[in-house]
Image: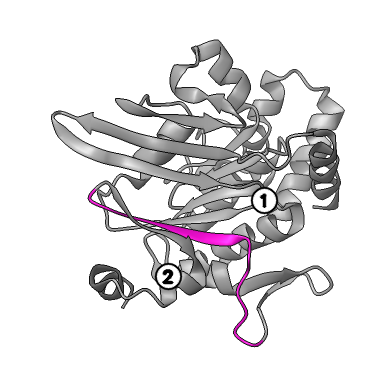
Amino acid sequence: MADLAQSDSATLEQQPDSKEPIVVVDNVSIIFDVKPVLQNVSFTVQRGETRIILGPAGGGKSVLLKLINGLLKPDTGSIRVFGEDVSTMRETELFKLRSRIGMVFQESALFDSISVGDNVSYRLHEDHLPEEETHARVVEALRFVELENTIEKFPSELSGGMRRRVSIARAIITNPDLILYDSPTGGLDPITSTTIIDLVIKQRDVTHTTSLVITHRIQDAYLLARSRFNTETGKVEQIPNNGIDDSTKFLVLNEGKVVFDGTTEELVHSTDPWLKEYLS
């Protein structure tokens, strides 16, 4: 998506605080029905970084993304996104902030009663963009996920993997500064999962958008860390010589606590017994 990449680059050039972290989670805890879901969680996501969030089911990963998006408030601690404290924002302020965030939900969360094109353009219509520009951007976003021929179809006519790709198109159509992927491969077969991860890699390498990616599949995480999108061939390929993408890092949660925060190399060579068992 060359236009998206150019737009993203222009945005970066206009922002004097380009070195400021995109997300800062500081000592955040939240409790549901007296059960701690997240406990004293702290980490930072830099501009252009892809942060893979791993951990067993029920460890608080999806709750963490909802907190970052301002859909939930922490009981203690603070969360800063684009330098703004989302934990103290009013709903009107959060609405404006979310216009800079793309969200890919666990089960796609498409509207069944409207077409693929209308699903993808939903946020553009909210912003009252001219119809001609809206249509052009919908086609561009669907072409990016290789589904431009589905624009007139309804979600019920698509496979699970195709619906997930449409949700990615919807998330990227506004040229967001941050993308939150909540288990984008959840419930999909291995081949379809690889297709989705390839799209996440493509988005990372074409636009360099800051992203947080939840996954339950270790193989998906390593694919993200060890692959790149080749703009000449238009395909995702393994980085030569067992290379690793420097912009991709890991956060591992277990029982609501951070048990790892660092690079792929540090994760692979960790001597922590729990981590070694989890990754094996």
Magenta-highlighted residues: 241-255
Q: How is the image coloured?
A: one colour
Q: Would you say 1 lies left or right of 145 here?
A: right
Q: Write the residue at 24% across / 73% down.
A: 273
Q: Amino acid at mark 2?
A: Leu
Q: Write the residue at 79% across / 31% down.
A: 134
Q: Amino acid at mark 1?
A: Gly
**Looking at the picture, does residue 280 appear above or below residue 61?**
below
Q: Quadrant of residue 107?
A: top left
Identify the residue position indicated by label 2 in the image. 267
Q: Quadrant of residue 145?
A: bottom right
Q: Would you say 125 lies left or right of 137 here?
A: left
Tell me where residue 79 appears, x and y as whole percent: 46, 31
- Viewer-side residue, 273 vs 221: 273
Give the CA distance from mark 1 to mark 2: 20 Å
- Can residue 191 be seen at all in this image of the molecule? no
